[in-house]
Image (tube, rainbow, N blue to C red):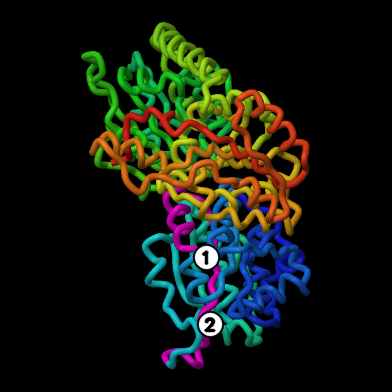
C-alpha cells in the first residue's frame, strides 16, 4: 500500500506509543484520513457531517474541502482519486439520500478495484428508532458493494473505525470502504487515539499481509512460457494499482512477450511500443496458444477466459494472476491461478525463466501480430481524416490524439463515443487513462475530471463525453468553475443512446426510446454555468476548436455533432 507521509497530527516520537487526543468526532475522523494520505474531502453540504467540515476548515490536517452539486460526483471523484494516486480518496456524504446517491460509485469502485472511503452521516443515536430526519440504516444497502461497511459505535470509536475503513480500502484487493457515524457522536467530544496509516490497530505495519509469490506456481508458469510458441500477456488495472508497472514492463520486454493492456494497465507499454498489440487483439486472442492474464478478471471483456481456437487453432492454455485470492477466476479452469504482490510475481517469473537454458524463437509470431496491428492502425488513419458530413467520431480522435501531451489524463464517460476512444487512444504513460471499467456506469466523468485536475495539476485533463452520459452530471461544470479547475471536455453528440440504438436495431429491426434531441447545445449549458464552449458541425473546425479549448484555461466543451449511423463496430455486448 502506497501512502503519503502522515501529517503533523499523526507523528509520534520514536519509541513512544500514541497519545490520546481530545476533540469532536469530526476532528478524529479527519485526522486519521489525513494520516492515510487524504488531501481533499469531496462532499456536498449536509448537517449530519458538519463536524468534518469544521475539522478541515479550522484544524491543521492539510485536508481541503471541495463541494459538488450532486453526491454522485463527490463519490466518483473519490473513486478516481483512488485510481490516480493509488491511495484511498475520501467522499463525505450526509445521511439518507446523500449516501444512497453515492452507491453507484461504490459499485464502480468495487468492480474497478479502486481504493476509496465513503464516510456517511447517520441520524442521531439518541433519537434512533423515533423517525428523525433521514433516519436510515445504510450499512445493509452498501455491504454488497464494499470491502468493509460499519457504523462507529461511539465518539471514541470514530478514529479506529476510520482507520479500519482506510486500511481495508487500501489493502489488496483494493476497493471501497464505508463508515457511517451517528450525528450526535460526530458532534460529541472525546479523547481518542488516532492511528496512523499502517494496517495494525495501532497504525503500525506489523499486521501487513504476506503477499509473497507462490514459487511453485511461478515455476509452472515459467515452464508454460518457455514451451509456448504463441504467447500473449494481458495487463489489467491491478498491475497499476499494485505499483507493478515497472516490473511488468521489464518482464515483457526482456522476454519479448506481445502484450494487450486494459483499464489502467493502458500506458504501461507506451503508445508505439513494438510489443503493444492491442490493435491485433482479435488475431492474438484467437490464435494464441498461451494467454497470461494479470491483474484483471476473466470477464466479458476477455471472452470469459476462453482464448484460441480460431482458424483451426487449438484452445489456448490460460494463466490467471491476481493481486489477491478472491480475484482469481476459476470458471475458465486456468492451468495456473495464483495471487500475490504483482510486482514481485513479475520479477520472480523473469528470474525463473532466465534460469531456463533455452527459449523458442517467437519472432514470427510477434511479427505477425505487429503486421496486423500496423494494418489496423493504417485503417484507423483513414477514419482520422474522414471528411464525412455528419462527422464520423473517428475524425474527432484524428484531431485530438496529436494534441494530447505525454502526461495527458484522458477520461471516458460514455458508450459508443468512448468505445472509439478505447480503440484510438494509446496512452504514453501508465495511470493516465480512466474509464468506467466493467461496471459501465455513466455519469462518472465530471467527478473523475475534478479528481484528475487536483491529482495532476500540471497535466492536460481531457474528458470525453457522450451526449447521453453528459445528462447525468453536466451540472457539475459549476463545480469546475467555482473551484477554478480547467478541463477540456470533448463531446461526441449523436443525439442518441448509441450503445442501445444499434443493438436494438440488430435484434428487432427497429429501435425505441434510444433517441435524444438532435444538436442539443450542451456547449451553451457549459457557458451558462460559467465555463466556455462551442458547437462544431464542420470536421475541418474540430482542430481549431480543440486548440481554443486547450488554450482557454477554463472548463471548455467542444460539442461535436456526429453521425448517428456511425456506430462502433463491436463484437460483444457484454452478455
Category of crowding for the residue at label 1, using alpha-carbon neighbours closer than 10 angstroms: few (below 14), some (14–19), many (at least 20): many
What secondary structure is found at the residue carrying circle 2? strand
User: Which quadrant does the C terminus fall into?
Assistant: top left
What secondary structure is found at the residue carrying circle 1? helix
Q: Which residue is mark 1?
A: 165
**Distance CA(mark 2)–CA(mark 1):** 16 Å
What residue appears at the point 68 percent right and 76 percent down from the top-left corner? 27
Q: Nearer the viewer, mark 2 or mark 1?
A: 2
Residue 433, position as x, y percentages in the image: 57, 38
Q: Is residue 126 magenta?
A: yes
Which of the 4 image quarters holds residue 35? bottom right
Residue 563 in the image: above or below residue 141? above
What residue appears at the point 64 percent right and 45 percent down from the top-left corner? 523
Residue 114, position as x, y percentages in the image: 51, 51
Residue 390 in the image: above or below residue 58? above
Q: Report the front residue among 338 and 150.
A: 150
What residue appears at the point 46 percent right and 48 percent down from the top-left corner? 112
Count of number-bearing discs: 2
Q: Which residue is mark 2?
A: 182
Q: Is residue 155 magenta?
A: no
Query: Mark 2 vs mark 1: which is more N-terminal?
Result: 1
Q: Is residue 249 left or right of residue 298?
A: right
What residue appears at the point 48 percent right and 18 percent down from the top-left corner? 255
CB under 8 Å between callouts 2 and 1? no
Magenta stretch: give its range.
102-129
Please give the label number shown on residue 527: none
Residue 470 in the image: above or below residue 60? above
Amino acid at each position: 500500500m502506497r501512502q503519503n507521509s502522515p501529517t503533523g497530527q499523526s507523528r509520534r516520537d520514536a519509541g513512544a506509543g500514541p497519545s490520546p487526543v481530545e476533540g469532536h468526532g469530526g476532528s478524529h475522523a479527519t485526522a486519521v484520513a489525513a494520516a492515510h494520505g487524504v488531501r481533499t474531502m469531496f462532499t456536498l453540504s449536509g448537517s449530519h457531517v458538519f463536524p468534518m467540515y469544521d475539522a478541515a476548515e479550522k484544524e491543521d490536517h492539510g485536508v481541503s474541502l471541495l463541494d459538488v452539486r450532486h453526491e454522485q460526483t463527490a463519490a466518483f471523484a473519490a473513486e478516481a482519486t483512488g485510481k490516480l494516486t493509488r491511495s484511498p480518496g475520501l467522499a463525505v456524504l450526509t445521511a439518507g439520500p446523500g449516501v444512497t446517491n453515492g452507491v453507484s460509485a461504490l459499485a464502480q469502485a468495487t468492480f474497478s478495484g479502486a481504493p476509496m472511503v465513503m464516510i456517511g452521516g447517520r441520524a442521531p443515536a439518541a433519537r434512533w428508532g423515533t423517525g428523525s430526519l433521514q433516519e436510515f440504516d445504510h450499512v445493509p444497502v452498501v455491504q454488497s458493494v464494499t470491502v468493509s461497511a460499519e457504523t462507529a459505535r461511539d465518539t471514541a470509536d470514530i478514529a479506529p473505525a476510520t482507520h479500519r475503513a482506510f486500511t481495508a480500502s487500501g489493502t489488496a484487493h483494493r476497493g471501497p470502504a464505508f463508515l457511517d457515524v451517528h450525528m450526535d457522536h460526530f458532534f460529541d467530544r472525546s479523547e481518542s487515539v488516532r492511528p496512523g496509516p499502517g494496517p495494525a490497530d495501532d497504525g503500525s505495519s506489523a499486521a501487513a499481509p504476506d503477499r509473497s509469490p507462490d514459487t511453485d506456481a511461478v515455476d509452472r508458469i515459467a515452464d508454460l512460457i518457455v514451451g509456448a510458441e504463441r504467447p500473449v500477456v494481458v495487463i489489467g488495472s491491478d498491475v497499476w494499482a499494485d505499483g507493478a508497472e515497472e516490473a511488468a514492463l521489464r518482464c515483457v520486454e526482456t522476454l519479448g512477450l506481445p502484450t494487450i493492456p486494459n483499464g489502467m494497465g493502458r500506458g504501461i507499454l507506451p503508445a508505439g511500443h513494438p510489443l503493444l498489440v492491442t490493435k491485433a487483439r482479435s488475431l492474438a486472442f484467437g490464435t494464441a496458444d498461451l494467454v497470461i492474464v494479470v491483474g484483471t478478471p476473466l470477464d466479458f471483456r476477455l471472452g470469459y477466459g476462453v482464448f484460441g481456437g480460431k482458424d483451426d487453432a487449438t484452445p489456448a492454455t490460460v494463466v490467471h494472476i491476481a493481486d489477491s485470492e478472491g480475484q482469481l477466476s476459476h470458471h475458465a479452469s486456468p492451468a495456473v491461478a495464483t495471487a500475490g504482490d504483482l510486482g514481485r510475481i513479475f520479477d520472480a517469473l523473469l528470474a525463473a525463466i532466465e534460469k531456463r537454458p533455452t527459449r523458442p524463437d517467437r519472432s514470427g509470431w510477434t511479427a505477425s501480430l505487429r503486421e496486423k496491428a500496423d494494418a489496423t492502425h493504417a485503417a484507423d488513419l483513414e477514419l482520422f481524416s474522414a471528411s464525412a458530413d455528419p462527422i464520423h467520431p473517428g475524425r474527432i480522435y484524428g484531431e485530438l490524439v496529436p494534441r494530447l501531451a505525454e502526461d495527458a489524463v484522458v477520461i471516458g464517460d460514455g458508450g459508443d463515443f468512448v468505445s472509439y476512444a478505447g480503440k484510438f487512444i494509446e496512452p504514453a504513460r501508465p495511470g493516465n487513462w480512466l474509464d468506467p471499467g466493467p461496471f459501465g456506469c455513466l455519469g462518472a466523468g465530471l467527478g473523475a475530471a475534478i479528481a484528475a485536475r487536483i491529482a495532476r495539476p500540471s497535466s492536460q485533463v481531457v474528458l470525453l463525453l457522450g451526449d447521453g452520459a453528459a445528462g447525468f452530471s453536466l451540472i457539475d461544470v459549476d463545480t469546475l468553475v467555482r473551484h477554478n479547475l480547467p478541463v477540456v471536455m470533448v463531446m461526441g453528440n449523436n443525439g442518441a443512446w448509441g450503445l442501445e440504438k444499434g443493438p436494438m436495431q440488430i435484434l428487432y429491426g427497429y429501435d425505441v426510446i434510444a433517441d435524444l434531441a438532435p444538436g442539443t447545445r450542451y456547449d451553451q449549458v457549459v457557458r451558462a454555468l460559467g465555463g466556455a464552449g462551442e458547437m462544431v458541425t464542420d470536421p475541418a473546425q474540430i482542430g481549431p476548436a480543440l486548440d481554443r479549448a486547450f488554450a482557454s484555461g477554463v472548463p471548455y466543451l467542444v460539442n461535436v455533432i456526429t453521425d448517428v449511423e456511425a456506430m462502433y463496430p463491436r463484437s460483444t455486448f457484454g452478455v
